[in-house]
Image (cartoon, helix red, strand yellow):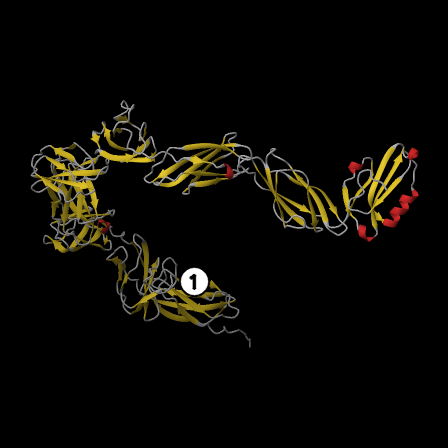
Amino acid sequence: MSVATFETAPSPPDVSVSAVRTDEFTISWSEVANASLIEIAVVPAPALSGDGVFKLHSADRQFTLERLDAETVYHVTLKALIQSVIVTDSIQLNQLTAPLPPVVYATEIRSSSMEIQWTTIPEAAHYVLNVYPRPESLPGSAEESFELLENSILLTELRAETRYEITVWAVLISGSTTNEAVVSQTTAPLPPKIILKEARTTRAALIFTPIKSTIEYKITVDPPVAGISDFSRTSTKLDLLQTRPDVEYTVTIIAQLEGKATDSRALTFSSAPPPVVASGKDKRSTSIRINWDPVPEAHRYYAEITPPTNSGISRIPIYTNFVQLSDLKEDTFYNMTITAVSARSTWTTDDHICEFSTAPKMSKLTTIDVTSHAMMLSWLEVDKIEMYRLEFSPSIGASKYETAFDLFVDNMEPDTEYEIAIIGIGDDFETDPYRLKRFTAPPAPVINFPSIKSRRLDLEWNSLPDDYYWIVNIYPVPAGHEDTWPLKTEETTFTALGLEPESEYSFTIRAVSEQRALVTDLTTIGQKTAPLGPPIKVPNHTVRTTSAVVEWEEIPTAISYKVFAKSLHSGSYDVHYTTSAISHVLQDLQALAEYEVSVLALLVGNGVTDVTITTFMTAPEPPTFEVVRARVKKDSTVHVNSTWSSITDDDEYFINMSPPTGSFRSQLVTKSNEQFHITGLALGRPYRFGIFAKLPDGKRTDVRSVVYQTPSSPRCYECSSVSDPKDCIAEVACPLNSGYSCMTFDRRENGRRMLTRGCKKRDACETQRKSHKCSSKHRHSCVLVGCCNEDLCNEGDRLN
């Protein structure tokens, strides 16, 4: 009996199907131990797969069947082969493929939207949509799919002129999915921009930006214009006629392209209000005011005038409801077109034409016979003018209305520039004023008398421009000056000579300008000459060395006197004084100098007398005073000898001392200049001496003041080794009453004398004196010593 052994095959793998699509699905299986191949048989066989048998490596775990037919049941058999002889049991399964994908198409394509639709798939649980680039209106990210139950969707918030790719597939109730259906579609361009070129009262003009490939621009206007609301066209220009005033219109435009259309764009604008209705007023020769009622919401107005103004202006922007036109031509017909414009020029009213004519030109105004207060005005007659108005600045009263052609004005101010305007008045106009500036003549000259003298008068009067001269006359005419008067002069000052003191004269004056044809009024004024100057004198008894008193007689009408003094020897003294007294003290004079003094009186009313002159000479310098010797006496008083200089042989001297002391208790009056002795003065005290001299002619010198300080103690002369006694002048205090003496030490060395003096104790001085004794014959070579006990006793050659 033969025995055969064999090994059974392992269990077949677990098989599953996934990812079922319209043309494919995937088969997955579990691992089979020691399997070398996996064999899959598909009936019916997929396209291009031969007999429908697929052998796969044992390591694979899944296999996708591709190129299948839609909605077809496929029978799949799967088994594993082990060493080519062992085969597992076959696993069989049937799988239905998904139907064909839906048909997708885009409709209602706009600039920012389009509608996506697709065919319905039976047994579809839902549909999945992907859009690239993904619009913001779809939730989720670009990688996420969007699930829908319906078979359409409106895509919004798209970008204009952008190509979008839309993918749609169906998910069936069974879990299988159809293949993807893809459609690509480009959005329409942005809608045309609407530009309002002009919005008037009864018309408007708009243009649109062109869109390429546009078949038609669909345009609607609301509310309708002249009963029409549809203004579709192929051009990019739209003119609306017969619009109504102050109406808000909305224009909507869509560009219709092949298979698509842009989004709609709307523009709302307001038609302009009714046109301006203007009228003129204040018509003048070169100007007129045009008024009209304000146009609501008007920002400005424009006026176009024909013909242009004189300066060439024809278009005028205006921000008020009136315009003041100027610089026009006289007596000219004008057309003016006025329109109102809104802010930012969103609308402009229809034209309003205003017709007007300017007034004629006023004739030239002339003046004649111009005086200080009056002038004659004249002008020529002007056609169409019924009356003339004259205005004056500064005003001379109310304006003057005249129908004649001249006017005499006599209430004007002198030397005043008047602006005179003459205006012609017609039925509905006034001419531009003709203006003339004209000065009236100056006031009549006024003569002043800055200096009224005894025998002459200084005249002055107000100055005028260079083209004026003056005519001056006097009555009575001074004898010998008949050829001077009447005086014609261009100066403003003059001196009338040859007059009599205290006499009345009458003067007349007027100013003439031949260039301006002006003559001032005549001025007459009287003036009396001054009296003769006051007699003056300088009394000798008031003359001093540096001062003197000037005296003069009083003049009853004088308000003050002017005193002039100068030195006749030099220019160092020249003084002027004004005083109301009848005397004056001249000071700071020089001794023995001759002076000239002049006095004149200033009278009431600018009068001045002649000058009275006198001369005088000052007194000499005062005498000098000197204390020539002072001695301290043993009773501790001081005895002084004084002297002074003399001026002339017949002078009288006056000496005073302050304080009065000792033998000098009262003023000393003497004609002698011999030494004057004063005793009983105190030690170490200052005394003041005053001295002056009285001359024989009555003049007196100034007082000379001298201060002398008496010694405070007895003194000795002091020196060291001088050769001459007169060189020993220094003084030193020495208590002579307390055991001291004045010592003199006199010696000879090599024929030269050596003299030494000073204060020394009395005993020492006596010892020195006794130890140096010389005989007369040896005196040229010995030493002599002297001692004395009185104030300044060691003087000269005195030796004890």
Q: Position of residue 327 (x, y in %)?
A: 19, 38
Mark 1 burial class by Cα count in 10 Å: few <14, some 14-19, many 20+? some
Kind of residue sitting beneath label 1: Phe
Left or right: 73 in relation to 294: right
Q: Position of residue 279 (x, y in %)?
A: 11, 46
Left or right: 606 in relation to 233: right
Rendering quarter of residue 781: top right
| Callout count | 1
606 vs 737: above or below: above
Rendering quarter of residue 356: top left
- Residue beneath the point at 42% across and 65% down: 40
Kindly tell me whether residue 274 is visible in this rendering. yes
Rendering quarter of residue 778: top right
Nearer to me, 74 or 689: 689
314 vs 679: above or below: above
Nearer to me, 640 or 739: 640
- Residue beneath the point at 78% across and 36% down: 726
Q: Which residue is mark 1?
A: 54
Mark 1 secondary-structure assignment: strand
Nearer to me, 518 or 764: 764
Left or right: 461 in relation to 582: left
Kindly tell me whether residue 331 is visible in this rendering. no
189 vs 603: above or below: below
Nearer to me, 547 or 94: 547
Q: Position of residue 443 (x, y in %)?
A: 23, 36
Instruction: Pick the quarter of the image with the N terminus.
Output: bottom right
Q: Position of residue 317 (x, y in %)?
A: 21, 44
Instruction: Pick the quarter of the image with the C terminus.
Output: top right
Residue extending farthest bottom: 1
